[in-house]
Amino acid sequence: MSKVVLFLVMFISVAGIMMSVLLILKHKPIFHGKRISVRNFVILFLVYVTVAIGFGCLYISLELMGVPVLTEGEVRVGGSFFHLLEDALYFSAVTILSVGYGDITPLGIGRWIAMVEAFFGYLLPAAFVVSTVANLKEKIRAN
């Protein structure tokens, strides 16, 4: 039963994010003939949400397969599926958006996954700035 709920959560999350991205790409906000930067920040937000949910699902999948990847204090994260879902998504969001609080810590392979996720969290703003500057230079050259 828990695998069905996991699949349902993953499907709904991915479908919602994809619909949001398609909606943004279809309806580009215009302000006096120029695109406003709100669109860029919404896309950046959606990228962060997508990556956080993806890594959260990875933590959940490993925990459901019996591989311990997260602990809360001295106790392995788990209990009910919804508690695992909450802890994994919380840990994923905290890891990608900051260094972490230390209330939930990774174990074993979870440490390597958390390091990769933290690198993504640090590199996404840089990629956002570089792509924005490159796009701006391209528009200036076109004029």
Image: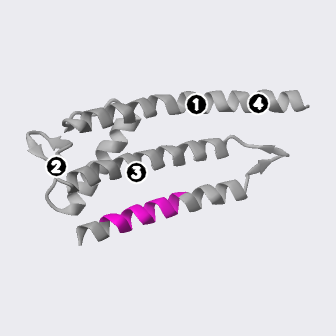
Under mark 1, the amino acid is Ala
Residue 122 lies in quadrant: top left
Under mark 3, the amino acid is Ile
Pointers 2 and 4 in contact (C-beta within 8 Å): no
Given residues 112 and 119, the one toward you in this image is 112
Residue behind mark 2 = 77
Q: Earlier in the sequence, mark 1 or mark 3?
A: 3
Q: Looking at the picture, does residue 143 appear above or below residue 61?
A: above
Q: Is 8 within the magenta?
A: yes
Q: CA distance from mark 2 to mark 4?
A: 46 Å
- The disc placed on residue 136 is 4
Q: Residues within 10 Å of mark 4 (few under 14, many from 20)?
A: few
Disc tally is 4
Pointers 1 and 3 in contact (C-beta within 8 Å): no
Q: CA distance from mark 1 to mark 3?
A: 20 Å
Tell me: 68 left or right of 141. Answer: left
Element type where label 2 sits in the image: loop
Residue behind mark 3 = 53
Under mark 2, the amino acid is Val
The residue that appears at 70% across and 27% down in the rendered structure is: 133
- The disc placed on residue 127 is 1
Image location (x, y in percent) of residue 69: 21, 43
Q: Is 97 within the magenta?
A: no
The residue that appears at 37% across and 46% down in the rendered structure is: 55
Pointers 2 and 3 in contact (C-beta within 8 Å): no
The residue that appears at 34% across and 43% down in the rendered structure is: 92
Q: Earlier in the sequence, mark 2 or mark 4?
A: 2
Element type where label 3 sits in the image: helix
Q: Earlier in the sequence, mark 2 or mark 1?
A: 2
Q: Residues within 10 Å of mark 3 (few under 14, many from 20)?
A: many
